[in-house]
């Protein structure tokens, strides 16, 4: 049985770095956030508002992400049931 440390709302478990992807993801995430802030401050608001006026790019992106997510969850579900079968 796994014994988790007690804390306010599970924060010690949430903020632990061992086995987490947060240390590897924080640098690209902060870089993208900084880039977004720079674009917001330097480029005109009217240009950003008219940048994407058609919903097609969002539709393609959401279709690809949902397709990949379904395959990933399906593989995880198959691994789970295979382990239950061996157990």
Image (tube, helix red, strand yellow):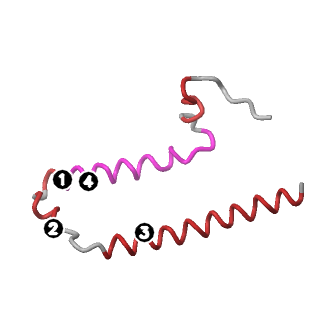
Corner quadrant of residue 14: top right
Residue 19 higher or lower than 5, as above or below: below
Dot 4 crowding, Cα within 10 Å, few <14, some 14–19, many 20+: few
- Mark identifier at residue 4: none
Residue to which mark 3 is pinned: 62
Q: Nearer the viewer, mark 4 or mark 2?
A: 2
- Residue 24: x percent and y percent? 50, 49
- Mark identifier at residue 36: 4
Corner quadrant of residue 71: bottom right
Please state which of residues 63 and 15 is positioned toward the viewer in this rendering: 63
Q: CA distance from mark 4 to mark 2?
A: 16 Å
Q: CA distance from mark 1 to mark 4?
A: 6 Å
Q: Are marks 4 and 2 in contact (CB under 8 Å)?
A: no
Residue span colored magenta: 18-39
Q: Residue at x 34, y 70 (%)?
A: 58
Residue to which mark 1 is pinned: 40
Sequence-first disc among 3 and 1: 1
Please state which of residues 49 and 42 is positioned toward the viewer in this rendering: 49
- Residue 27: x percent and y percent? 41, 48
Residue 19 higher or lower than 12, as above or below: below
Sequence-first disc among 3 and 2: 2
Q: CA distance from mark 3 to mark 2?
A: 21 Å
Sequence-first disc among 4 and 3: 4
Q: Are marks 1 and 4 in contact (CB under 8 Å)?
A: yes
Sequence-first disc among 1 and 2: 1
Q: Nearer the viewer, mark 1 or mark 2?
A: 2
Dot 3 crowding, Cα within 10 Å, few <14, some 14–19, many 20+: few
Dot 2 crowding, Cα within 10 Å, few <14, some 14–19, many 20+: few
């Amino acid at each position: 049985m796994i014994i988790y440390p007690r804390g306010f709302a599970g924060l010690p478990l949430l903020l632990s770095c061992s086995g987490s992807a947060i240390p590897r993801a924080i640098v690209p995430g902060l870089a993208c956030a900084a880039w977004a802030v720079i674009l917001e401050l330097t480029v005109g608001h009217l240009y950003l508002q008219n940048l994407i006026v058609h919903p097609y790019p969002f539709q393609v992106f959401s279709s690809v992400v949902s397709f990949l997510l379904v395959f990933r969850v399906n593989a995880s579900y198959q691994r789970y049931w295979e382990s239950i079968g061996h157990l």
